[in-house]
Image (spheres, rainbow, N blue to C red):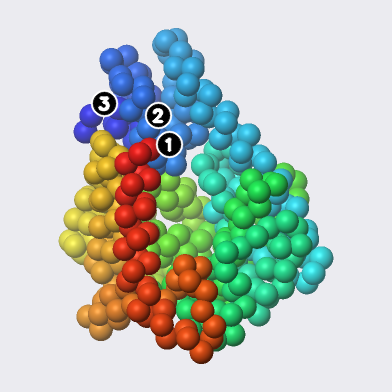
């Protein structure tokens, strides 16, 4: 591992504050580092605020040369955006509650406060809300009345069940915010995990800037983040950081037992193990001995965690982009526990139309079956457009 990658990794590991860890960071900071690469790796992995704060502390404590000014600028730009999005989240939650819609924010500002005590310590560009399926239409109406717009009317998807739909995106040019409304944890290609209603009953009170908000219990949030991490191919170190931070907030043995039991019940056992293995292997998150034994017994999971973690620090954006594309398909296949489940994943993932296909071409309901023909065309064009965009960047 190159010094720049080792610096970023050490800066966000869970051994914060130990003398040995600070010695390692101090030694790395005195090397001839490529600070542009440091900023790129930290930003790309969504951990720049964590890395900057830790490095800045070590620099101050050890009397080392100050960090480059552009790192400070990036940190403060993220802080301004995060505070703005936190204020917007509180505004929207109040509007939704006024219309009888109960929403549970997860990730974003609430997770930042839970893990780090401050909204500025996570990178996020959108706000994610869980709502009951029966409340999706009302939630969409509230957001649109508040100035948000969406490319696709989710009422069509909900009324027909034709599309593989579990979330809808709303964008506001005025507030520069993006809202993702979720009414399921994962798409139909990954039909695993507990129901939102079950998680709802175990929710707890949290606080955001002194305002009470609903939140998922830490074990349930670990479950959700592990599922979504597998869905995305664990593309960022920030996702692992979130799981690692939550692990320390599950002190009770019964909570660990319930998490493992439910993972087995919902056929997400290997998905949860992979998330916990990543947190332990790369960020030194402490796990109960029996959970550590479960991970050690599954060599495929430990090997997969090693490959995923190494990919976080790949140099070259084009190479990393290609790896992410591959991981988004390969990782779910590796952790789905049955062969029929893996076949179903492949078929649904590539064949069943989604809301994005509905955005691509608007068809009347009687012609919806044509989306099965249009979907491969849309996927190909989207892949080419994304490749060109990333290469230009």
Structural distance between the alpha carbons of marks 3 and 2: 13 Å
Q: Residue furthest bottom?
A: 366
Residue 141 placement (x, y as % from top left): 72, 69
- 30 or 179: which is nearer to us? 179
Structural distance between the alpha carbons of marks 1 and 3: 16 Å
> In the picture, residue 197 is in which quadrant?
bottom right
Q: Label 1, on which residue? A: 43
Residue 30 placement (x, y as % from top left): 32, 14
Please report contact status of discs 1 and 3: CB closer than 8 Å, yes or no.
no
User: Is residue 282 visible in the rendered structure shown here?
Assistant: no
**Residue under the point 58% across and 80% down:** 156
> In the picture, residue 340 is in which quadrant?
bottom left
Q: Is residue 72 left or right of residue 110?
A: left
Residue 334 placement (x, y as % from top left): 24, 67
Crowdedness near tag 1: few (<14), some (14–19) or many (≥20) residues, C-alpha within 10 Å:
some
Q: Label 2, on which residue? A: 39
Quadrant containing the N terminus is top left
Structural distance between the alpha carbons of marks 2 and 1: 6 Å
Please report contact status of discs 2 and 1: CB closer than 8 Å, yes or no.
yes
Secondary structure found at label 2: helix
Secondary structure found at label 1: helix
Q: Label 3, on which residue? A: 3
Please report contact status of discs 3 and 2: CB closer than 8 Å, yes or no.
no
- 53 or 146: which is nearer to us? 146
**Nearer the viewer's eye, disc 1 or disc 3?**
1
Number of numbered markers: 3
Q: Is residue 62 above or below residue 150?
A: above
Q: Is residue 55 above or below residue 148?
A: above
Mark 2 or mark 3, which is nearer the start of the sequence? 3
Secondary structure found at label 3: helix
Quadrant containing the C terminus is top left
> In the picture, residue 84 is in which quadrant?
top right
């Amino acid at each position: 591992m190159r010094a720049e990658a080792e610096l970023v990794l050490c800066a966000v590991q869970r051994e914060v504050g130990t003398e040995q860890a600070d010695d390692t960071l101090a030694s790395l900071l005195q090397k001839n580092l490529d600070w542009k690469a440091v900023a790129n790796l930290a930003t790309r992995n969504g951990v720049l605020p964590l890395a900057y704060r830790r490095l800045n502390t070590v620099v101050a404590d050890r009397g080392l040369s100050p960090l480059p000014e552009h790192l400070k600028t990036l940190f403060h730009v993220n802080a301004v955006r995060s505070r703005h999005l936190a204020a917007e989240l509180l505004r929207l939650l109040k509007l939704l509650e006024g219309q009888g819609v109960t929403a549970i924010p997860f990730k974003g500002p609430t997770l930042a406060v839970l893990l780090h005590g401050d909204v500025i310590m996570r990178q996020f560009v959108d706000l994610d809300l869980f709502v009951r399926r029966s409340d999706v239409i009302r939630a969409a109406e509230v957001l649109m009345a508040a100035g948000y717009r969406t490319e696709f009317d989710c009422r069509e998807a909900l009324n027909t069940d034709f599309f593989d739909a579990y979330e809808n995106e709303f964008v506001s040019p005025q507030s520069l915010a993006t809202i993702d409304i979720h009414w399921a944890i994962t798409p139909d290609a990954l039909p695993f995990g507990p129901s939102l209603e079950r998680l709802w009953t175990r929710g707890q009170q949290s606080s955001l800037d002194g305002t009470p908000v609903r939140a998922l219990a830490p074990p349930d949030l670990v479950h959700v983040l592990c599922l979504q991490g597998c869905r995305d191919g664990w593309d960022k170190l920030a996702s692992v950081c979130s799981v690692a931070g939550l692990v320390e907030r599950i002190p009770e043995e019964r909570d660990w037992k319930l998490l493992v039991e439910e993972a087995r019940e919902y056929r997400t056992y290997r998905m949860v193990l992979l998330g916990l293995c990543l947190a332990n292997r790369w960020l030194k998150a402490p796990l109960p001995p029996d959970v550590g034994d479960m991970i050690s017994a599954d060599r495929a999971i430990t090997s997969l965690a090693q490959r995923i973690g190494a990919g976080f620090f790949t140099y070259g954006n084009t190479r990393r982009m290609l790896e992410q594309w591959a991981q988004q398909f390969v990782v779910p296949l590796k952790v789905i526990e049955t062969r029929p489940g893996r076949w179903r994943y492949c078929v649904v993932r590539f064949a069943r139309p989604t809301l994005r296909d509905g955005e691509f071409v608007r068809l009347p309901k009687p012609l919806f079956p044509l989306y099965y023909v249009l979907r491969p065309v849309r996927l190909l064009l989207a892949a080419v457009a994304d490749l060109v965009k990333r290469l230009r960047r």
